[in-house]
Image: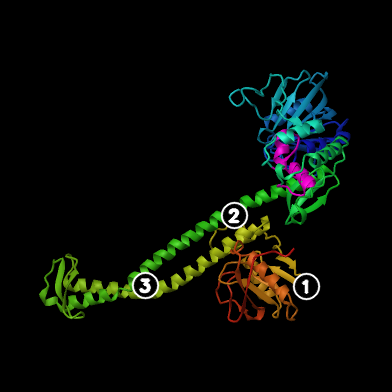
Amino acid sequence: MPLDAICLQAVVAELRPQLVGLRIDKVQQPARDQIVFVLRGKRLLLNAGAGAPRIQLTETLRDNPAEPPMFCMLLRKHLAGARISDLTQPPLERLIRLELDASDELGRTGRRTLVLEAMGRRSNLILLDGEGRIIDCLRRVDTDLSANRPVLPGLYYEPPAAAGRLPVSEETAPGFSEKFYAAPSEHTLDKFLLDNYFGLSPLMARELAFQAAGDTDKRIFEMDGPSSLWQTVEAFCTRVREERFTPVCLLRDGKPLDFACVPVKQYGSAAEYVEFGSFSALMDFFYEAREKQERARQRGADLQKAAATARDRLRRKLAMQEKEYAETQNRDRLRICGDLITANLYRMERGVARLECENYYADNALVSIPLDPLLTPQQNAAKYYKRYTKAKTAEKYLRIQMEQAAHDLEYMESVLAEIAQAETEQDFSDIRTELQEAGFLKKQGKKKVQKRASSPWEYRTSGGLRVLVGRNNRQNDQLTLKSANRRDIWLHTQKIHGSHVILCTGGAEPPEQDLLEAAQLAAWYSQARESANVPVDYTEVRNVKKPSGARPGMVIYNTCRTVFVTPSTIQ
């Protein structure tokens, strides 16, 4: 998890001077795992969620439920009007103690302590009285869940058991050397640090290994000795003791990857390094972006399921139509049966179940024709002619329906490719609207005012030319048929679903390198992203047409050139 013990220490060092002496004016619980204290214009967030336990000042406003939960009511009873007297953290523990001077209903002053255990899935918020007895907690832990450490009202609070490893800040050079030589030689340096010391997150262990050896995967047997690693660890611990922290966030493709309290260099050019003015601002940015991504992922999962269901339904429909079409190809047999019945009426009697006669269409070979005993011979002949006519008509319409179903199936495959590369809630909203307008999803509720559509992805080639990439089928149409200049270059993967890509040339002949980079983008934003050698067609926009009645994103082109590329984005 990003907020390790050392990063938590940095947060406490930042918050303590801002919080001590402030009074809690309001207590809110906007979510099951979140408590917000409003104190003199500031909002202190304590999150005990398994995926994001933390303490911070927040600028993000959260909606509160109409009925406050029981734990929120309990905190209001004990902490409303209380003043924060101290904010402490046991050395290198993921545990925060918020010491509060409170008053009871009779005005008697007393001490309350709110403990935040920021320990992943075991995170908790625990309220203690002045004697260290548990008043209540966010998650009650009985003896069935933990026989060694129950957390229940009325019990004295016991901190979590020690990890059994030495705090990294308490290590000495001789002790470090002894552990280094005793460790299995095939272990990596970061594993050695995590196995022997607590207080370090996997990210920081890899960073220390990178700073000491220039490689996050360096193994013990590849080192000349422990000196370089020890010097790196000692310098890091000195920085922690002196509280020289820097709020930094790592971004990959514009998305938050991780954050730390010291500069992180192990990712090199693969990640962007951004400094923030405070840890609270950093965590607001990081967790808000991550929650937004999670919401988008959930919406994307629902849309993916709906689109996949529609695609599977089309596949079954097309398979049934193909089966019916195959049956119509044998319709001449029905006409022949009618002819043979008509030619042999003089030999037939009503009520027979079968006609045995010579087939003069096949060298007078004997043939057996099933009959309906309840019908007259003339009616049996008419029945076969009717079935023949019906099959002949069905062939004509089935061919049209199969063609339409095949186009719809191809369209749904393109939509699924769009969903796979969608990133934001607006992307998913656009795709959902597209499917609703195409009739594959039902429109729900009243018609809402549409937000402004998202913009295409935009890149610059090494030669400085703009490259625009459509995010969805409707945007592909807009980009290719309306926005692009007729002399711009249009690119698309050959016979593979993907985005329309426009290389803006201004009517000039594009350099070969710029054309290759645009083709690599077209391959990247397609279903062939994981392939190594992808064919990409390119032609001028004026050569691209949309057939009448075609689904969004469907176009045709008669002249093109093809280049084979490896999918890649433009850095």
Residue segment shown in magenta: 188-217
Q: Position of residue 131 (x, y in %)?
A: 77, 18
Decide whether the magenta segment is chiefly helix, strand or loop: helix
Residue beneath label 1, please?
A: 463
Image height of 102 relative to 244, above or below: above
Q: Quadrant of the N terminus?
A: top right
Asked which quadrant contains residue 502, the reply is bottom right
**Residue 35 spot, x, y in % from top left:** 74, 35
Residue 505 horizontal/vertical position (percent)? 74, 77
- Distance in Å between CA atoms under marks 3 and 1: 57 Å
Residue at 61% x, 79% y: name it: 560
Name which residue type carries label 2.
Gly
Asked whether residue 547 is in view, the answer is yes
Q: Is residue 533 above or below residue 190?
A: below
Task: Say whether marks 3 and 1 touch (CB < 8 Å).
Answer: no
**Above or below, comparing residue 63 to residue 179 in the picture:** below
Residue nearest the viewer, comparing 182 with 535: 182
Query: What is the CA distance from the residue labelled 2 to the residue labelled 3?
Result: 38 Å
